[in-house]
Image: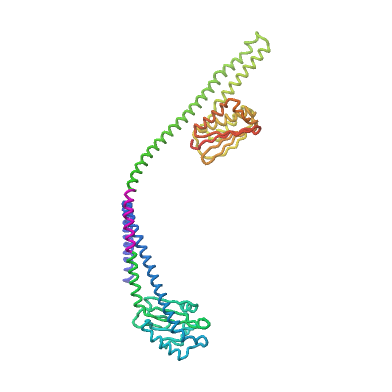
Amino acid sequence: MQFSGATPSHHEWLKELSILTNSLLETRMAGFRSWWPALSLARQFTLASSALVLAGLGVLGFWVAQKIESGVKAHTAARTALYMESVVAPYLQELGSRPDLSAENKAALDTVIGKDAARLRVVAAKVWTRTGVILYATDKALIGQKFPLTPLLTRAWEGYVEAQFDARHYGDDHGTSMVGKEPLLEIYVPIRHSATNEIIAVAEFYELTSELNRELVRSQINSWLVTAIVSFTIIAGLYTIVANGSKTIETQRTALANRISELSALLQQNEELGQRVQGASRRAAEATELQLRRLGADLHDGPAQLLALALLKFPSAMDGGGQASERQILRGVLEDAMAEIRNISSGLALPEIEKLSLTQALMVVASEHERRTSTTVACEFASRPIDLSHPTKLCLCRFVQEGLSNAYRHAGGQGQAVTLSWSENFIVVEVADRGPGIEKGASERKRPALGLIGLRNRLESFGGHLTVSSAPGAGTRLTAYLPIGA
């Protein structure tokens, strides 16, 4: 009952400790994020490079320690293999023809190994068969016992000299141990038959490693010291170079910031001037359109009305004078003049398009042309949900109106077509016909077409351009390109 009652308070204490730790970490990180950018480039380099060098030093020290240990094991294993080949192997040759060692060879092995044990610091030795049976051992109690083959023992039977060192290992799973708990180095050497070179046994030696351990530690300390001295010498030299470079960079950074500020101010002025020029161009285009509307209204309400009145009064005014043929000619001339004035008036004024989309406005222009000329216009309009300014729509409507007028005048209205499409940055409008086209050299014989010049000027004032494609007998195609943001 006491334990269950104490558990909630313990959990609450751990929760509060976790919250406090997270808060402290967040505070530290916030402080670091505000402190690090304030340091100079040289100081940032010194701190970052020191951390990297220390990490690299640890990795390098560990790698060197592993290399030294591997070198020591390889050297000791090679020395033991040479000893086995020259001293021990002759007493094991009979294993090539029989499964066991004779008593004489076992006694000889005891004598040889016992004589060299102190010099080689050997504390135990074994001779293994391929099936894991110990044929000989300095510990006589192990002779004849069978153990599972270890990976190192298996590698030795494959012809490799293997060694295993572990400072925490004081024996093995085969019954070998050392009084005093001193680490051992296990060495496995394959024994080959002198005649057939076949592996007939594997000899295992156990050597004391206290002296090897001291040598390893001494070598590792020396390698770490040399690495540290070289590393910090490099850091000091690089710091000197980076410190000088940092001063130069700071000076250049200040100068560059001043230049950027000046360029930004100039860029802003240029943008303002560009906007003013573009606005003036649009206002001029709107003023021109307004003037054309007024001109159309004046022609319609003035001369056209007067001519119509004269036509109404014509019969009564001319009853008594002149011949009938002359009166007929005069009447025809007046009718033609009135029709021409009305055509000019209707061509100068566009319908109200301010509240229409570009597609709707172009459709109205094409319909008005069909009504006036009794011809057909094929329209293909790609819709796109984008708002265009009134001057832009007006410019494109004027382009289509002039293009269709040219198609009717020069091609008799054959194959009239209007196409609207969109590219990534441009509005593309085409007016085409299937008339006789423009003959080569016609522009040189005749004066320039004022209609095309006006269209080109109008489009260029909005940042666009005009292309004319024509060939004799293949018709004519006028293409207008106008920026979407114009």
Taking the magenta stretch, the answer to whether it contains residue 242 is: yes
Q: Is residue 56 visible?
A: yes
Q: Is residue 89 left or right of residue 224?
A: right
Residue furthest bottom as drawn: 103
> Which of 313/463 is in front?
463
Q: In this rendering, is residue 474 above or below 49?
A: above
Q: In this rendering, is residue 230 above or below 451?
A: below
Residue 409 image position (x, y, % from top left)? 62, 27
Q: How many marks?
A: 0
What main secondary structure does the magenta stretch of the protein show? Answer: helix
Residue 192 image position (x, y, % from top left)? 49, 81
Residue furthest top as drawn: 320
User: Which colour scheme appears in the figure?
Assistant: rainbow
Image quadrant in which you'd find residue 397: top right
- Read off the magenta span: 228-248
Taking the magenta stretch, the answer to whether it contains residue 172 is: no
Taking the spot 35% from the left edge, 79% from the top edge, the residue there is 182
